[in-house]
Image (cartoon, rainbow, N blue to C red):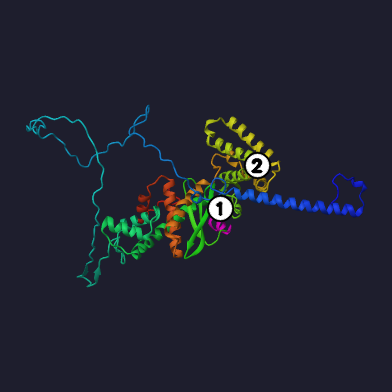
Amino acid sequence: MLDRNVDLKELNKEELIELVNLLLGRVSTLEKQVAELKSEGKKSVKKTSRNSSIPPSRDQKSNITKKQKAKRGPKCGHQGNSRRRTKADEIIECRVTACEQCGMDLSQNRQWLVGRHQVIDVPPVRPIVSEARRYRTTCPHCHHQQTADYVTGFERGRVFGRHLEQMVLYLHYAHPLSYERVQRIVLELFGLKITQGALVNMVKRAQPALTCAAAAIHQQIKQSVVIGSDETTARIDGTKYWQWVFQTPDYAYYVIRPSRAAQVIADVMGDAQPQVWVSDVFSSQMCHPAQHYQICLAHQVRDLQYAIDTHQCHWAQQVQTVFEDAMHLHRQRDQFTATDFACQRDDYEATLDTLLQVVPDNIDSETLRGRYTKHRSALLLFLHRHDVPPTNNASERALRNSVIYRKVTGGFRTDWGAELYADLVSVLETARRQGRSIFETLSALLAGHDAFSVSHSL
């Protein structure tokens, strides 16, 4: 081995070659050690719902410290709030009948009202069986035999009424319960023994009305200015499908397709061109038809958190702070004048531009910087438009019940079942966003009312 203090000018060609080979070997060894250390550092930081898109259900849960039960009544300095009395359907008079000291009859004495207490209950529910009878007669003039038709609700093949069908739809999809559990609830509450096949037929009978309502919601979505979208997995007959949602503050439209490709967006939106598309940065979502787009900053904050946890990256911390402060400014925009809000917005824009000129020293932050540079116009668009949200949380919340339904039922057995579910959940979520009663909305649709037509003012 050559002396490290030797003068390189005194070395001949062979000695220089030996020294270079030695240095290359050492560099190679050090590079491997650095790569191993980086790999070990990444493995030490696990991805959770706080630093990635992993759902919270997959996080490791710690034991929750039990809190002391709060005392009854309002807090000190706060006004109490209890259930208000309503008009009573039945009044029970609780009068004094006899003296508890001597036993004297007091029923005829004058008595004063000193208190009232209401108890709310529901009466025992039992099914009502209605029977329609058809009659036939012969015309005395032309001798033609005429048979009366059954009234609406007594169509051939129908065994159970509209209200029972409405309740089955409500329990199975809105809450969501499996057919087996719905079957048991109907048996225990109403004493009705219904097969699961009959429950399926009830659901299937409602499909035309639900399809019509979902089509009306679809038209409203296509006419919207700002649209949010997301997708999650679904199962049909053991095959992986994708459930898509397209939503606004007042409407939500769902489809279930075998693909996660951008063609689904093209099929749903058709020739419609909204002004803004809100989504994550998945490649198919980036093929939207909108003029502008806003990417979900909640996803970016979590991705930046992973870079902070893994590499202690100061650049990622600064960008995360800009995103969080910008979202806070969006929530407080009504508290500022237009001039003050514009000044703060411009400060965030300038700060972000400055940060994107810096090259981070780790691969995770470099990847995020490349993403933000590519989608720079989609990062803070919500500060320029009050109708654009900074996150896509509304779309994710719109899919939450579908994820629960998938876990409860395991998926769909048939294509028509998946299509019916997409139409029905479109109706349920739209009704919820508009502040409507889901149960009453189902009742109106099954009664033939057009609740979500384009002509309706919502």
Give how far apart the Cα atoms at labels 2 and 1 are. 42 Å
Q: Residue furthest left?
A: 104
Residue type at mark 1 is Ala
Q: Which residue is mark 2?
A: 313
Q: Which residue occupies 47% across, 54% down?
A: 403
Q: Residue furthest top?
A: 77
Q: Secondary structure at mark 2?
A: loop
Majority secondary structure in the magenta region = helix
Tell me the tag on residue 272: 1
Estimate the x, y position of residue 302 in percent, counting from the top left.
57, 45
Q: Earlier in the sequence, mark 2 or mark 1?
A: 1
Q: Nearer the viewer, mark 2 or mark 1?
A: 2
* Residue 457 visible in this rendered orientation of the protein: no
* Pointer 2 local density, CA inside 10 Å: few below 14, some 14–19, many at least 20: some
- In this orientation, which residue lies closer to the viewer: 46 or 145? 46
Q: Secondary structure at mark 1?
A: loop
Estimate the x, y position of residue 427 in percent, counting from the top left.
42, 53
Q: Residue furthest bottom?
A: 143
Judge whether residue 266 is colored magenta.
Answer: yes
Q: Which residues are magenta?
A: 261-268
Drawn side of residue 268 relative to residue 343, left or right: left
Drawn side of residue 306 relative to residue 9, left or right: left
Q: Which residue occupies 45% across, 45% down?
A: 63
Q: Is residue 86 above or below residue 181?
A: above
